[in-house]
Image (cartoon, rainbow, N blue to C red):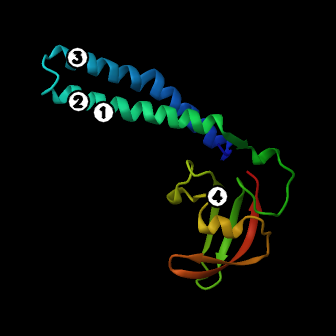
């Protein structure tokens, strides 16, 4: 399997979720299954079937996180040589040259992406258009709404 890039914060969040699922959620579900079994006939026991379904989702997510963490390429941008080049994990301030709207994005892994928090996936069209470019460059990015021209105002490694 190929390596999955993620920031230090992203890896830590996944580890926290994994710990929660294993130490809190899994035991809760096991208790729910045990309680539902006590109610008798399992064929018509909706609590039992619901708890088993939750168990399947929980175990699937645990497996998914463990796989991602075992294949993670954790990148700590604070330890990289400072540059003005846009890379995975960097924070980029851009200006839309049509609307003059300014925006700041942090380029992160797929699991960390949250557009409302300006965390964009390294695989998103905007990030793909910015990675490898430098402060002062003008880039044209194909978006669902058409081509948009951005000027890279600042690149920071936070």
Q: Which residue is mark 1?
A: 53
Disc with the residue nearer the chain's start (1 vs 4): 1
Q: Which residue is mark 3?
A: 35
Local SS, label 4? loop
- In space, the residues marked 3 and 4 are separated at their CA atoms by 45 Å
- In space, the residues marked 1 and 4 are separated at their CA atoms by 33 Å
Q: Is residue 31 left or right of residue 58?
A: left
Local SS, label 1? helix
Name the foreground residue: 7 vs 78: 7
Q: Which residue is mark 4?
A: 122
Q: Is residue 26 left or right of residue 99?
A: left
Name which residue lies at 74% across and 71% down.
153
Quadrant position of residue 34: top left
**Image position of 49 with respect to 77: above or below:** above
Name which residue lies at 80% across and 69% down.
134
Q: Which mark is residue 49?
A: 2
Local SS, label 2? helix
């Amino acid at each position: 399997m190929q390596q999955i890039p993620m920031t230090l914060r992203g890896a830590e969040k996944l580890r926290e979720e994994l710990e929660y699922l294993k130490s809190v959620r899994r035991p809760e579900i096991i208790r729910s299954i045990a309680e539902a079994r006590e109610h008798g006939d399992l064929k018509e026991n909706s609590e039992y079937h619901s708890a088993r379904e939750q168990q399947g989702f929980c175990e699937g997510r645990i497996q998914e996180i463990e796989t991602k963490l075992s294949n993670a390429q954790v990148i700590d941008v604070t330890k990289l040589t400072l540059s003005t080049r846009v890379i995975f994990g960097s924070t980029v301030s851009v200006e839309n040259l049509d609307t003059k709207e300014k925006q700041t994005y942090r380029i992160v892994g797929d699991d960390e992406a949250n557009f409302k928090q300006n965390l964009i996936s390294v695989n998103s069209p905007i990030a793909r258009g910015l990675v490898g470019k430098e402060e002062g460059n003008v880039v044209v990015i194909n978006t669902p709404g058409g081509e948009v021209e951005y000027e890279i105002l600042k690149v920071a490694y936070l």
